[in-house]
Image (cartoon, rainbow, N blue to C red):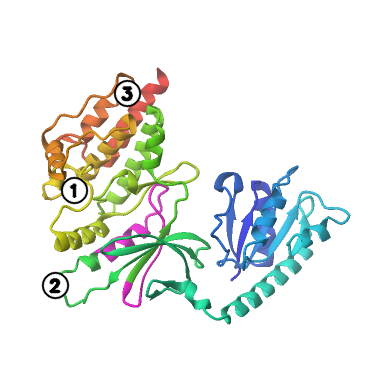
Amino acid sequence: MPRILLIDDDERYRRLYRHHISILAADADVVEHVPSRDGQLPAELTGAGYDYVILGAPPGSQSGLSWLKDLTDRPHFPPVIYVAETLDGDDAADLEQRGAIGVLCKAKIDHARLRELMDIAQARRREEVKLYRQTPGAEQIYRFGDIMIRGERCIRQLATSALSTVYLAESEKVGRLVVLKVFGQVPDRTEKNNTFDRFLQEYQIIAGIAHPNVVRIYDLGVADDHAYITMEYFRAGDLRMRIRRGLQPGLAGHMLRQMAEALAAIHSVGVLHRDLKPGNVMLREDGTIVLIDFGLAKQVELEAEITATGEIFGTPYYMSPEQGHGREVDERSDIYSLGIIFYEMLTGQKPFLAPTPMAVIYKHSHAPLPALPAPMRQWEPVLAGMLAKQPADRYASAREVVGAVDEVLRRAEQA
């Protein structure tokens, strides 16, 4: 089954290409990239997951040529079929000299020529891959430290902790950059503590959630006795960076709504987040808010860190009072953490600060919430419902938070 990367801003042409492809290669896996929405392809992407690329040039612009040069200059990038806005004279020869394997015209797609180019591109790609795999050290691209994970190409290490190491990788399976997290050696299944198994099951549950505000989990597996997961990579960064630039209250409210929707989705399948903080709230390039790093993944790390150091795991700034004191938590603990994030989004400041972690935890349980500046006072009832000291006094569910946010946004629109 060929995998094709389709690049064009115009939805009409993307539909036209798909129509032709469906006739010529009914089993093809076509992935669309829309430059105006998705931006430039990441510089690290080699296109290893694709057989070939169909690149549509935008009308009246030289950017199609810059895209062609960028892609064909990348080592081992798949063949590119270029679709020009118009085509006459020596255009095709010139574009082929610039790196295209062949050229078509948008005004009238030559079906027979497209079939010929698709066959040529796929045959050339097979030969290129075969030759590359015969080069010395070719398999080293699949090595993550001491672990070999075939189908995932290591680009660089991003972070490490006592339990796991995080890498930026290119997945041949999904044809894009991913975050790959490799965990410590799989525990002996005869051990009484089954937290690790429960953690794997929980990530499988998250992987089954199709929600725009929940991170996409692409794969979960075990290699060389180490569990790993691959998940969505976010070039736009996290909420910490966005808070530093400042947020208007209305935009902060819309972001809060997305985060609450994500919590409602994961809570509905029995998963708690347990570690909500701005660093675990990511942004896609289209501005969508996405939650990452859930539940038992953090519980496993918590147990490992406490065993090793005897210290409190993680930042206390976003912990609910019950979590900070080691009591049982439920959905309302996540809602409290979300409220702390929202306060910081509105003001640029954390509500509770102190010299030590335990002093911060004490303030969560006893200190009143600092008042919001006057222009933001319409959000105080929402914060009160999220940040009540006692769980029983908070919103009972993330869905209730969504409803409360909608009401404030509705009133703001009518004002």
Residue 203: % across, % down:
32, 61
Amino acid type, mark 2: Lys
Tell me if residue 398 comes above or below residue 378 in the rendering: below
What span is in magenta? 199-226
Secondary structure beneath dot 2 equals loop
Tell me if residue 127 comes above or below residue 355 in the rendering: below
Secondary structure beneath dot 1 equals loop
Residue located beneath label 3 in the image = 376
Q: Please tell me which of labels 3 and 1 falls first in the chain.
A: 1
| Mark 3 burial class by Cα count in 10 Å: few <14, some 14-19, many 20+ | some
Secondary structure beneath dot 3 equals helix
Compare residues 150 and 307 and report the one nearer the observer.
Answer: 307
Residue located beneath label 2 in the image = 192
Please identify the quarter of the rendering in which residue 37 is found.
top right
Marks 3 and 1 sit apart, C-alpha to C-alpha, by 29 Å
Which residue does the image show at 35% across and 52% down from the upper left? Answer: 292
The verdict on residue 219 being magenta is yes
Residue 20: % across, % down:
70, 60
Residue 5: % across, % down:
61, 60
Which residue does the image show at 25% across and 63% down from the upper left? Answer: 162
Residue located beneath label 1 in the image = 330
Residue 102: % across, % down:
76, 63
Task: Point out the image quarter for the N terminus.
Answer: bottom right
Residues at discs 2 and 1 in contact (Cβ within 8 Å): no
Which residue does the image show at 29% across and 65% down from the upper left? Answer: 200
Amino acid type, mark 3: Met
Which residue does the image show at 38% across and 50% down from the upper left? Answer: 214
Residues at discs 3 and 2 in contact (Cβ within 8 Å): no
